[in-house]
Amino acid sequence: MDRVIDTVNAFDDYAGNYDQWFDSPEGKALFSAEVEAVRLLTKGLEHPFLEIGVGTGRFAEKLGIDIGIDPSDKALDIARKRGIRVQQATGEILPFKDGIFGAVFLLFTLCFVKDAGAVIAEAKRVLKSGGGLIIGFINRESPWGEHYMKKKTEGHPIYRHARFYTIDEVAGLLRQVGMGVGAYASTLCRQPSQELTGEKAYDKLIGDAGFVCILSRKE
């Protein structure tokens, strides 16, 4: 069974547990900081918004995303209950016409896809001219990256399927499709073992931040 099928099956099997984690004290603290980091880059972006890898719809609900796609049936069932308009699809083959979205979001999705370059190319294709692609990811070269890499090596049911990226690697994937970095936002600057409540988001790149967002505009 290939990695993609394994990943989809894992999200189907653990969709409920994954979603409930966001209601834990740690989940609430991390999610609040991550949403704020993404919001710092949404100013001036026009609807409609698309999220690739919408999962259970937590980010889509908070960010006012209009439509989401995901290959996991069970995750999409939860997203629908949040009122999110969703379709079952993969990021490598988006079921949309060219140039129809004002913004596309890839939030914690890049590490789970089969072909990251193809997903970014598809995101660019469906963006309007001047539209923005926001990629939010765990920075592998950070204490949080080490934390999640440890989970991966220990066989975590979700993260064992992940491939974590560095900031330079994500910027390189954008360059491959003719896009560049327009702005950064960062959060999770504390150690995983430290108190997380009150974690702040910054409208700049912090190299050892655990969660980094990149905004790239389509010319």
Image (tube, rainbow, N blue to C red):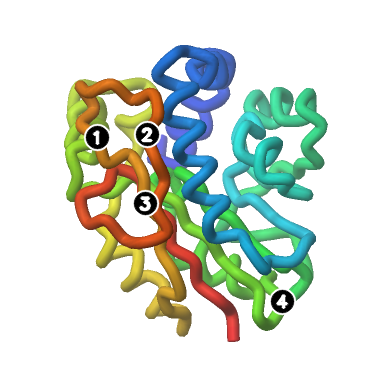
Label 3 to label 1: alpha-carbon separation: 11 Å
Which residue is identified by label 4?
Answer: 128
Label 2 to label 3: alpha-carbon separation: 11 Å
Relative image position of residue 62 (x, y in whole percent): 66, 37
Amino acid residing under circle 2: Glu
Question: Which sits in the foreground, 72 or 104?
Answer: 104
Relative image position of residue 125 (x, y in whole percent): 64, 74
- Looking at the image, which residue is at 40% across and 63% down? 184
The mark closer to the camera, 3 or 4, is 3
Q: Is residue 137 left or right of residue 145?
A: right
Which residue is identified by label 2?
Answer: 199
Question: Which sits in the foreground, 37 or 218?
Answer: 37
- Looking at the image, which residue is at 40% across and 29% down? 198
Label 2 to label 1: alpha-carbon separation: 7 Å
Q: Are marks 2 and 1 in contact (CB under 8 Å)?
A: yes
The mark closer to the camera, 2 or 4, is 2
Which residue is identified by label 1?
Answer: 190
Look at the picture and state if 215 lies above or below 111: below
User: Label 1's element?
Assistant: loop
Look at the picture and state if 196 lies above or below 211: above
User: Label 2's element?
Assistant: loop
Q: Earlier in the sequence, mark 2 or mark 3?
A: 3
Look at the picture and state if 210 lies above or below 115: above
Amino acid residing under circle 3: Ser
Which residue is identified by label 3?
Answer: 186
Label 3 to label 4: alpha-carbon separation: 26 Å
